[in-house]
């Protein structure tokens, strides 16, 4: 029998679920049946978390792990659904794992969001058996814990791949298995501690025989000032010495949770005698000790903000007064023995902790009789109200069983703790929805989650109608619930999660009322109550699993009639209905694995990409993004890089490139169309593809959307905040995400200014603030180049907006704006020249590129200003407009001189350049030719120099394209090279024609022949002007003309034909499809 379709937060399999159209109307689901079928019915959209737990122990539930010795329940789920759930998992906990039961189910899966991984083996695994760890451990992992594992090179190699690893925990195996532990593991641990982001080390001693080995490990951590968190447990009370405490004096987090034996009082006395206190910087302390040791340790931690305390004796009289002096505490987690008798006057000491945000009180070693009337807590309403009276900052509160709240205490808690977001209490006595009616304002305005064991309902109000006599029965009409809905909504406006696992036979109505509040379902017409929403029976004594699901996103997308939907959870469930459609998760096959290229070819293409292509996609760190690393993290990114490398090596006309390009398009389509699974590498692959494809606009737009979905803008903000606060100890992953997001912005701004795309994301504030990141030692040379691009393109976008957003009636305003723009560009260039001069080992190509970009930005600003004026005919331009054109001409001449100057590193690197750079290079030279005709120079030698430069430029572009003119393998290079060569020839012919027309003795038939020659030239060159300058790029200036100049008509007529939709602009080339895919 399939379970109901889950839409809410809690479904208890142990209850008898009513399923219509089923021969057996009521049937309890056990753990095996539920786990084998429940995943097939979970929602496929909006799922945030899925967890299976055992309800037998109430809130002390034990995990039902996916992996057991012989059964892996994930195997029962179809592959595409497995990957969907794997995409949502942030924490993985595998116990009793072996290769035969864990690797089989997970070897094809990716776990992109896992940040914490815990592995416990049932025996010591060999290196080969540890292969099942590979899917789980990736660059995003921040915490890894392993117990009873073979700590060999396989395990530590995996740890080295975790770019943002902060915490490492492992158990020390017995000496009889690893006699050389000190030499082998000690060396590996030392390497891990040298990772720039690692600042936590947790070592669990599992055998008294290994004390010597553990001591040698402590020597490794003794002089590591960057370690902020050291945790020592399981037998290590022998190791906690005065010398160790002194060695760890720089710690912020200290965990001395010695499970087998508490911290002794003599050692506490010895630690207290150390001057100055070694715990001056400790903000988090986790400790197991005796209550009489706390008064000695508490004064040593003046900055302590979080205390997790486990007491091993039953004396609360000495404990509470000491805790009351620690007024800086924001978090207090207190665990005391079940035999402790806590008195009311003891708890009132805690009222002085006015900064508390979280308080939790639990009992350890509690026996089964504790489940009924608990007597461990001996304080009542007055003591509770006194304790919480000063907790105005409290956000999370958890009280133990036996501390049942009355109606008055519950109200006092709401008034004293207005910021409370999470509340966990055993029970509320004599309670009902009508008790809130007299209140004038919300009782818990911020409360989002509440968990109760049971509610003891109070008597109905005196003015209740006759049909309210049995209001607690389960079959009350809809209007009974709807009567109290406005009252509950008013006083719990943000409640989204309500869990009452044992409502009781007389409690169904009250449970359903609170359930409706958490579902934000005040209108009974929107959803009729059904038996499926009512809990049947009592779970006490059953072994029933619980499934917790957050499905609010899918609710919002499917239920359009609800205007407001709760952000976290939605209680209840509905019947399942099988869809007529299925979704298959996109697969990205590895080019090498499927045999498209060999490993040697992959290495060559990969290294070629990083020889120069990465200059145009500066989102990589050569030290981290190696062949093995990229290939393991993302087959899509690996394929995109190899395809571009093959483009440079083999050309776009080679069969090898066509094959890789075809399969890369398939991979992109598969990944983009499948739900979930987006990673930073997916965005990087889109950026690589966009730089070398005609579909650049849609690819960049997709990259923006995906980058926002996975939180790359937040990563940039967090990186800035950490560096500003001098907390840049673990920013490797943030740096990778930030540079990826910045390059997304650069491409979007380029396509906005130079291709006419809409700009969807703008910088808020001055982009120069990003320069603070340059102080981080993890930044690369390419990062500086990237930040320069960010500033320039934001500046260009602002200029573009200033010119486009208004109509300038006075051309002087335009001239002033142009002058300001030129100054801003000069300041930008001067700043970055000085920044680069202060660095060592800066490649010369960066300085050349900055000069080229300065000329380009200046030219585009000037030409756009001329376009805004609305006059394309130079003959009718005002002196100010002609002056702007003259400045553009001078900037273009400087651009040409810069790129052809020796050693011509800019031109030599064009073979790696993206399409936009080739288009800029050709356009600048063509526009310079045109301006030389429209604004002729008196010095004729300049024209000859320009022609000579054109031939040099053509030769260099031919070399960059890969061969001579007939053998060029790069279609983009071939297109722009032909344009340059024909443009140079026509410019030469126009100059000769001008000289012929201006001669003193020109015969009539010669003059007629010259005019006919220019007339034929106009129709002769239709085929060589690419449509990119008309439809793909928005470069201003090509529409300029002069009514008295005929020598430039060959370009004007072609552009006019293009704008009128005439003909194929590039007829002698192969179809534009190949150009676009180049």
Image (tube, helix red, strand yellow):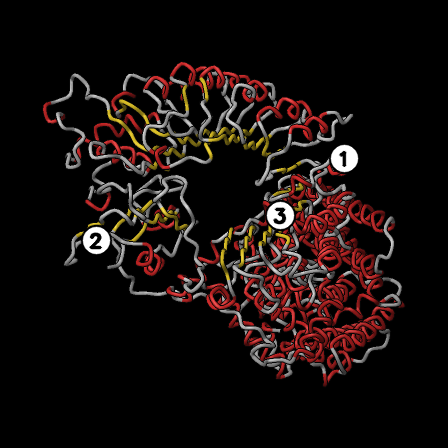
Residue that carries the numbered disc 1 in the rendered image: 246
Pick the residue in front: 1073 or 336: 336
Residue that carries the numbered disc 3 in the rendered image: 204
Measured in 3D between alpha carbons, the distance from the residue under mark 1 to the one under mark 3, in whole angstroms, is 20 Å
Relative to 327, residue 236 above or below: below
Relative to 378, residue 995 above or below: below
Q: Residue at x 44, y 60 (%)?
A: 68
Pick the residue in front: 1077 or 797: 1077
Residue that carries the numbered disc 2 in the rendered image: 27
Relative to 1011, residue 227 above or below: above
Q: Residues within 10 Å of mark 1 (few under 14, many from 20)?
A: some
Q: Tag 3 or tag 2, which sits nearer the N-term?
A: 2
Q: Is residue 127 left or right of residue 67?
A: right
In the rendered image, the quadrant that contains the C terminus is bottom right
Q: Residue 589 in the image: x percent, y percent?
A: 54, 73
Please tell me whether mark 2 or mark 1 is closer to you in this view.
1
Q: Residue at x 71, y 81 (%)?
A: 968
Q: Residues within 10 Å of mark 3 (few under 14, many from 20)?
A: many
Contact (Cβ within 8 Å) of mark 2 with mark 1 = no
Q: Tag 3 or tag 1, which sits nearer the N-term?
A: 3
**Residue 488 appears in the figure:** yes
Pick the residue in front: 887 or 278: 278
Q: Residue at x 41, y 40 (%)?
A: 60
Contact (Cβ within 8 Å) of mark 2 with mark 3 = no
Q: Residue 403 in the image: x percent, y percent?
A: 38, 25
Instruction: Give the quarter of the image for residue 226.
Output: top right
In the rendered image, the quadrant that contains the N terminus is bottom left
Contact (Cβ within 8 Å) of mark 1 with mark 3 = no
């Amino acid at each position: 029998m399939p379970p109901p379709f889950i839409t809410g937060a809690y479904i208890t399999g142990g209850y008898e679920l009513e399923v219509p159209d089923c021969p057996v109307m009521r049937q309890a689901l056990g753990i095996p049946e539920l786990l084998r079928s429940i995943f097939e019915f979970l929602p496929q959209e909006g799922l945030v978390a899925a967890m299976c737990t055992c309800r037998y122990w109430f809130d002390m539930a034990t995990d039902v792990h996916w992996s057991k010795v012989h059964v892996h329940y994930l195997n029962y789920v179809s592959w595409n659904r497995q990957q969907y759930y794997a995409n949502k998992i942030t924490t993985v906990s595998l116990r009793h794992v072996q290769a035969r039961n864990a690797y089989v189910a997970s070897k094809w899966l990716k776990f992109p969001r896992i940040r914490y991984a815990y592995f416990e083996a049932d025996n010591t695994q060999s290196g080969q058996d540890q292969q099942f760890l590979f899917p789980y451990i990736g660059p995003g992992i921040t915490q890894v814990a392993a117990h009873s594992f073979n700590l060999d090179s396989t395990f530590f190699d995996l740890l080295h791949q975790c770019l943002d690893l902060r915490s490492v925990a492992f158990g020390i195996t017995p000496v009889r298995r690893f006699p050389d532990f000190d030499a082998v593991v000690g060396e590996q641990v030392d390497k891990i501690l040298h990772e720039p982001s690692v600042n936590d080390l947790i070592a669990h001693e599992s055998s008294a025989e290994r004390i010597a080995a553990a001591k040698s490990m402590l020597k490794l951590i003794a002089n590591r000032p960057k370690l902020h968190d050291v945790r020592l447990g399981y037998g290590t009370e022998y190791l906690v010495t005065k010398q160790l405490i002194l060695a760890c004096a720089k710690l912020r987090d200290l965990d001395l949770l010695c499970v087998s034996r508490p911290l002794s009082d003599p050692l506490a006395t010895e630690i207290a005698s150390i001057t100055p206190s070694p715990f001056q910087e400790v903000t988090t302390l986790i400790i197991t000790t005796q209550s009489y040791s706390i008064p000695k340790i508490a004064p040593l931690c003046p900055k302590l903000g979080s205390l997790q305390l486990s007491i091993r004796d039953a004396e609360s009289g000495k404990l509470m007064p000491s805790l009351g002096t620690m007024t800086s505490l924001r978090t207090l987690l207190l665990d005391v023995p079940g035999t402790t008798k806590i008195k009311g006057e003891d708890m009132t000491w805690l009222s002085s902790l006015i900064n508390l945000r979280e308080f939790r009180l639990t009992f350890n070693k509690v026996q089964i009789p504790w489940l009924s009337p608990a007597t461990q807590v001996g304080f009542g309403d007055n003591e509770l109200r006194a304790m919480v009276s000063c907790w105005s900052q409290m956000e999370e509160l958890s009280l133990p069983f036996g501390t049942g709240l009355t109606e008055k205490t519950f109200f006092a808690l709401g008034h004293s703790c207005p910021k409370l977001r999470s509340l966990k209490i055993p029970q509320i006595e004599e309670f009902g929805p009508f008790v809130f009616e007299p209140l004038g304002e919300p009782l818990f305005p911020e409360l989002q989650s509440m968990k109760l064991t049971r509610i003891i309902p109070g008597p109905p109000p005196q003015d209740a109608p006759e049909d309210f006599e049995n209001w607690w029965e389960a079959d009350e009409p809809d209007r009974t619930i709807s009567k109290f809905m406005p009252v509950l909504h008013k006083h719990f406006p943000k409640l989204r999660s309500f869990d009452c696992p044992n409502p009781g036979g007389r409690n169904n109505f009250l449970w359903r009322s609170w359930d409706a509040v958490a579902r934000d379902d005040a209108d009974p017409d929107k959803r009729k109550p059904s038996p499926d929403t009512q809990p049947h029976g009592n779970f006490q004594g059953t072994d029933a699993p619980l499934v917790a699901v957050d499905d609010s996103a899918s609710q919002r997308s499917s239920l359009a009639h609800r205007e407001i939907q709760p952000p976290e959870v939605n209680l209840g469930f509905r019947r399942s209905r099988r869809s007529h459609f299925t979704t298959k998760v996109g697969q990205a096959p590895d080019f090498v694995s499927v045999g498209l290229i060999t490993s040697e070819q992959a290495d060559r293409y990969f290294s070629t990409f990083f020889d120069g292509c990465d200059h145009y996609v500066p989102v990589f760190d050569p030290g981290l993004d190696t062949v093995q690393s990229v290939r393991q993290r993302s087959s899509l990114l690996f394929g995109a890089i190899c395809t571009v490398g093959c483009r440079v090596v083999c050309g776009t006309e080679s069969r090898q490139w066509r094959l890789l390009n075809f399969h890369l398009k398939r991979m992109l389509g598969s990944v983009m169309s499948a739900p979930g699974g987006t990673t930073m590498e997916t965005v990087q692959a889109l950026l690589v593809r966009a730089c070398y494809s005609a579909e650049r606009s849609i690819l960049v737009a997709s990259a923006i959307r995906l980058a926002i979905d996975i939180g790359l803008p937040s990563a940039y903000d967090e990186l800035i905040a950490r560096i500003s606060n001098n907390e840049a100890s673990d920013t490797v992953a943030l740096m990778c995400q930030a540079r990826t997001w910045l390059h997304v912005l650069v491409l979007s701004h380029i396509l906005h200014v130079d291709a006419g795309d809409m700009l969807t994301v703008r910088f808020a504030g001055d982009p120069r603030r990003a320069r603070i990141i340059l102080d981080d030692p993890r930044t690369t040379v390419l990062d500086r180049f990237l930040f320069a691009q960010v500033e320039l393109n934001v500046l260009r976008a602002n200029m573009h907006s200033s010119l486009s957003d208004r109509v300038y009636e006075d051309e002087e305003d335009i001239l002033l704006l142009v002058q300001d723009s030129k100054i801003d560009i000069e300041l930008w260039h001067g700043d970055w020249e000085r920044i680069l001069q202060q660095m060592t080992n800066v490649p010369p190509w960066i300085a050349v590129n900055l000069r080229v970009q300065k000329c380009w930005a200046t030219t585009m600003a000037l030409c756009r200003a001329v376009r805004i004026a609305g006059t394309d005919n130079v003959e009718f331009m005002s002196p100010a407009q002609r002056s702007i054109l003259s400045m553009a001409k001078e900037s273009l001449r400087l651009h040409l001189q810069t790129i052809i100057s020796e050693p011509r590193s800019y031109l030599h690197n064009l073979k790696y350049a993206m399409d936009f750079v080739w288009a800029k290079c050709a356009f600048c030279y063509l526009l310079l030719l045109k301006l030389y005709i429209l604004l002729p120079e008196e010095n004729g030698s300049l024209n000859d120099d320009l022609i000579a430069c054109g031939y040099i430029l053509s030769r260099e572009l031919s070399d960059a394209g890969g061969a001579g003119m007939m053998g060029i393998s790069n279609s983009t290079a071939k297109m722009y090279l032909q344009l340059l060569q024909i443009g140079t020839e026509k410019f030469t012919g126009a100059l000769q024609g001008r000289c012929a027309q201006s001669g003193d003795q020109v015969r009539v038939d010669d003059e007629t022949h010259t005019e006919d020659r220019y007339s034929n030239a106009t129709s002769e060159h239709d085929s060589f002007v690419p449509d990119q300058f008309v439809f793909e790029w928005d470069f201003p200036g090509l529409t300029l003309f002069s009514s008295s100049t005929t020598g430039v008509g060959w370009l004007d007529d072609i552009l006019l034909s293009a704008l009128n939709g005439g003909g194929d602009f590039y007829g002698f080339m192969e179809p534009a499809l190949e150009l676009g895919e180049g």
